[in-house]
Amino acid sequence: MSTIKIKQVKSAIKRPADQKATIKALGFRKLNQTIEKEATPQILGMVKKVQHLIHIVE
């Protein structure tokens, strides 16, 4: 499978609990942190859920 790089660009403060949990489950700990994940359907679904808080880095 291919990998994707994801960068958190907005804070999860004042967001619903499920969005906070998704950001944490993706592995983000700090703002502007970039992580690399496998592009599985589960990860892509998590990315779609919090797409307003993150950017996909090419």
Image (cartoon, rainbow, N blue to C red):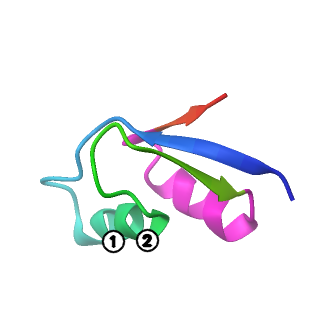
x, y percent for residue 7: 46, 39
Q: Which residues are magenta?
A: 39-54
In the rendered view, would you say 38 is above or below 9? below
Q: Residues within 10 Å of mark 2 (few under 14, many from 20)?
A: few
x, y percent for residue 23: 38, 61
Apparent side of residue 14 relative to residue 55 in the rendered image (left or right): left
Q: Amino acid at mark 1?
A: Ala
- What label sits on residue 25 in the rendered view? 2
x, y percent for residue 17: 24, 71
Work out which quarter of the rendered image holds the N terminus and state it.
bottom right
Apparent side of residue 39 relative to residue 35 in the rendered image (left or right): right
The reply to whether discs 2 and 1 touch (Cβ–Cβ < 8 Å) is yes
Return the residue nearer the eye: 49 or 29. Answer: 29
In the rendered view, would you say 20 is above or below 35? below
Work out which quarter of the rendered image holds the C terminus and state it.
top right
* Picture quadrant where residue 38 is located: bottom right
Q: Which residue is mark 1?
A: 21
* Picture quadrant where residue 31 is located: top left
Residue ID at (83%, 51%): 2
Q: Secondary structure at mark 1?
A: helix
